Image (cartoon, rainbow, N blue to C red):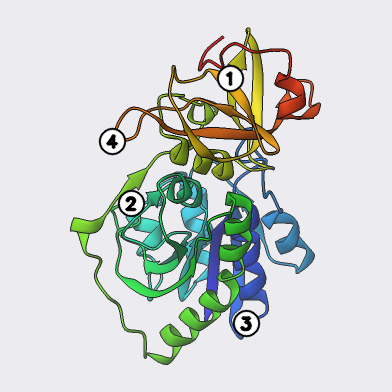
Amino acid sequence: MRVVMFGYQTWGHRTLQALLESDHEVVLVVTHPRSEHAYEKIWDDSVAELAEKHGVPVLLRNRPDDPGLLEAIRAAAPDIIVANNWRTWLPPEIFELPPHGTLNVHDSLLPAYAGFSPIIWALINGEERVGVTAHRMDAELDAGDILLQRSAPVGPRDTATDLFHRTVGMISPLVRESLDLIASGTAHWQPQDRSRASFFHKRSVEDSRIDWNWPAEDLERLVRAQSDPYPNAFTHHRGERIRIVSAAVSKARYGGTPGRIFIREGDGVVVVAGADARGGHRPGLLVRTIRTEDGTEYAAGDWFRSMGGYLTSRP
């Protein structure tokens, strides 16, 4: 089949690589210009460079709403469009143009976690599995019929970085198998159960701010979800912004005011966290490694040894 590909960053790069290695012909690639957004500079393998290396025409667009792009797609005469990590809505005159429509690859187990940053949100929310979905694009966000899904378990110490690598490795076989099913006429499309749908927005710096009223278990997942190279979860100590790089849930239970720097435990220092449903004494966040704004990393117990006081959500 003749394929036009829409994609961006490492997800789009991996999809394009799979297409180039398949029996299908990539006739045009559409991608975004590089961005300075904190989250879009992560995993930023260039789709444009890979396409140009293989002699595939490339168009750079922030939005797909100009007549020139539509005419270029028509001239390419694709049998199908494949999209992965295209950051803006595609209009029907584009996604319905090819005979086989548009196959979108989304890094969640749809219908859950439609939208942006699904791996990070899923880890924060304590999901047991993450994955990738190949589905038919329609006018609703990530709502089209599903062709294939692949999933992987979330381990108790997994970070968002671990889960990124685990799921991005699923893209190539998923794309190749999906296109082969479509080309052979054996694709079986399954409508999504919209009663199970959930939607999440783009992550921003504000979403990494620690609220010490959260239970320690939730805060520990937030720290893992904001693992390097993502912007780390952060708090403030005496007006200085502090990033928490690694943490765990304390073994003992502690009472007191959320955010209070309490006591050494093992290889870290306990910070009192919000009450659980039972109230009273509860686990604290055992902070192990912190990073100051100048990039210097410290063992938390050493850094807080003579500091004391409170960690606060705002300076």
Q: Residues within 10 Å of mark 3 (few under 14, many from 20)?
A: some
**C-alpha separation, residue under disc 1 versus residue under disc 3:** 56 Å
The amino acid at mark 3 is Ser
The x, y position of residue 121, in whole percent, is: 44, 45
From the viewer's perspective, tell me whether residue 139 is left or right of residue 171. left
Report helix, strand or loop for mark 3. Answer: loop
Label 1 close to label 3 by CB (< 8 Å): no
Asked if one can make out residue 102 in the rendered structure from this viewpoint, the answer is no
Q: Which residue is mark 2?
A: 141
Q: Which residue extends farthest left?
A: 195
N-terminal-most mark, 2 or 1: 2
Write the residue at 34% across / 27% down: 280
**Residue 277, disc:** 4
Q: Which residue is mark 1?
A: 261
Q: Which residue is mark 3?
A: 22
Q: Residues within 10 Å of mark 2 (few under 14, many from 20)?
A: few
The amino acid at mark 4 is Ala
The x, y position of residue 312, in whole percent, is: 53, 15
**C-alpha separation, residue under disc 1 versus residue under disc 4:** 22 Å
Asked if one can make out residue 110 in the rendered structure from this viewpoint, the answer is yes
Report helix, strand or loop for mark 1. Answer: strand
The x, y position of residue 247, in whole percent, is: 61, 39
